[in-house]
Image: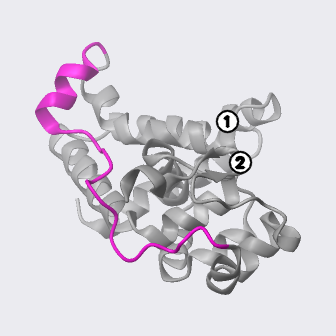
Amino acid sequence: MTEREFWRVIGTARRGSARRGSVADLNRQLGTPESALRVRGLERLLEEREVREVLAFHRTLAAVHRRAYRWDLWTAFGIALGGVDRWQFRDAVSWLLLRGRRAYRRALAEPDVLARWDVDDAEIASAGAVTTVAHRVLDPADTRNLAATIGGIDPPDRPWGYLTEADFPLLRRRFPRLTARHLPGGSCRFDGALFHERPFAWKAWR
């Protein structure tokens, strides 16, 4: 499966979850997170594929994830969500790619674009299931052993790029739209250890 085909599958799942009158539409009205609906649609699509295609999807998913493990994107999600740890950042990347190739590329080109979207904790948490979608499709009864065989999608040892210090003037210059939306007036407390009363992601990684 090429990366172009990978994004085509993601797009099909995204459009399917948005179709009015569908089961997904009903579940949305009942409060199911959009990310969960897209992951379910993705599972159904992959269930129709051959094993080698599911494995290829998993490998491409891992590569797309790795490309997004960057300090600037992590910082952007930290501002939007009030701080994220490495596993929450993995889920945030999953949420981003479930929005489709265009959104993914825009965010990697300029993470401050996250200010244009509603970044919700429940949506982020639900999106994390995409990292194990291949495991559930191939062997829903034994996903743990399967993960040991084909690998998981875990955060790498260290993100790419350079770290922006937890200093409001610096963050405001680097992420003007995000800070204007989520940190109005610079009233948030920055002491290098806390960010919106949650451990700031980079504190344990420096």
Q: Amino acid at mark 1?
A: Ala
Q: Residue at x 18, y 39 (%)?
A: 151
User: Which disc number belongs to residue 179?
Assistant: none
Q: Is residue 34 visible?
A: no
Query: Residue 100's x, y, as percent?
Result: 52, 63
Q: Is residue 35 visible?
A: yes
Query: Residue 16's x, y, as percent?
Result: 59, 48
Q: Quadrant of residue 63?
A: bottom left
Q: Secondary structure at mark 2?
A: loop
Predominant secondary structure, magenta span: loop
Q: Marks 2 and 1: in contact by CB < 8 Å? A: no
Q: Quadrant of the N terminus?
A: bottom left
Query: Which residue is most to the left?
Result: 149
Q: Residue at x 54, y 59 (%)?
A: 96
Decide: is 26 above or below 183: above
45 in the magenta segment = no
Query: Residue 128's x, y, as percent?
Result: 48, 40
Query: Which residue is most to the top?
Result: 141
User: Which disc number belongs to residue 120?
Assistant: 2
149 in the magenta segment = yes
Question: Which segment did they paint magenta?
Answer: 141-167
Decide: is 109 above or below 114: below
Horizontal side, residue 33 vs residue 130: left or right: right
- For marks 1 and 2 on the same chain, the one whose residue lies earlier in the sequence: 1
Residue identifier under label 1: 24
Label 2 crowd (10 A; few <14 / some 14-19 / many >=20): few
